[in-house]
């Protein structure tokens, strides 16, 4: 019974750490660029896109498709980087425990 209580306390402590980390990561920003830095996207680790910056030199009215591709690449890269960061940070807390991966 004592082992069960100890495990329960450990699980509660881990849950508290995970919640705190999730809250922190929801505010932490990551950035990803495309087009050699011409387009930059900033997102939080919970997947919220915060900002997209486009260098005016890359804006070509005759090649809108390229600009769209650069923006999409930067946004997807930033969101993926945020998710990877979230997964790595959460994994550090659960390391050593037999807990299945949490869906993000």
Image: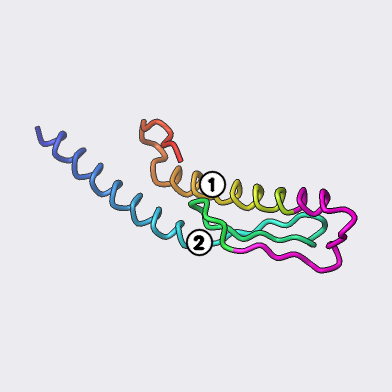
**Residues drawn in magenta:** 51-70
Identify the residue at image location x=42%, y=60%.
24
Is residue 95 found left or right of 12 in the rendered image? right
- Give the residue number, with chain letter if any, for mark 1: 83
Way the structure is coloured: rainbow
Label 2 packing within 10 angstroms: few (<14), some (14-19), many (20+): some
- Describe the element under mark 2 as helix, strand or loop: loop
In the rendered image, which quarter is residue 52 located in?
Answer: bottom right
Is residue 49 found left or right of 36 in the rendered image? left
Q: Inspect the magenta stretch and tell me whether residue 85 lies in it.
A: no
Q: Position of residue 67 (x, y in %)?
A: 80, 54
Viewer-closest of 24 and 44 = 44
- Total residue callouts: 2
- The alpha-carbon separation of the residues under discs 1 and 2 comes to 11 Å
Viewer-closest of 68 and 37 = 68
Identify the residue at image location x=78%, y=61%.
37
Question: Which one is earlier in the sequence, the residue at label 1 or at label 2?
Answer: 2
Identify the residue at image location x=11%, y=36%.
2
In the rendered image, which quarter is residue 99 located in?
Answer: top left
Is residue 43 found left or right of 11 in the rendered image? right
Q: Position of residue 15 (x, y in %)?
A: 29, 47
Most extreme residue toward the bottom, as rendered? Answer: 56
Q: Position of residue 80 (x, y in %)?
A: 60, 46
Identify the residue at image location x=36%, y=30%.
98
Q: Position of residue 40 (x, y in %)?
A: 71, 61
Viewer-closest of 1 and 47 = 47
Relative to 68, residue 91 above or below: above
Most extreme residue toward the left, as rendered? Answer: 1
- Give the residue number, with chain letter if any, for mark 2: 28
């Amino acid at each position: 019974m004592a082992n069960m209580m100890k495990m329960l306390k450990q699980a509660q402590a881990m849950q508290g750490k995970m919640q705190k980390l999730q809250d922190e990561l929801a505010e932490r920003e990551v950035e990803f660029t495309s087009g050699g830095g011409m387009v930059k996207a900033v997102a939080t680790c919970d997947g919220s896109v915060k900002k997209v910056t486009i260098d005016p030199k890359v804006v070509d009215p005759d090649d809108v498709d390229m600009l769209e591709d650069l923006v999409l690449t930067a946004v997807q890269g930033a969101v993926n980087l945020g998710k990877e960061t979230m997964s790595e940070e959460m994994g550090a807390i659960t390391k050593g425990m037999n807990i299945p991966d949490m869906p993000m």
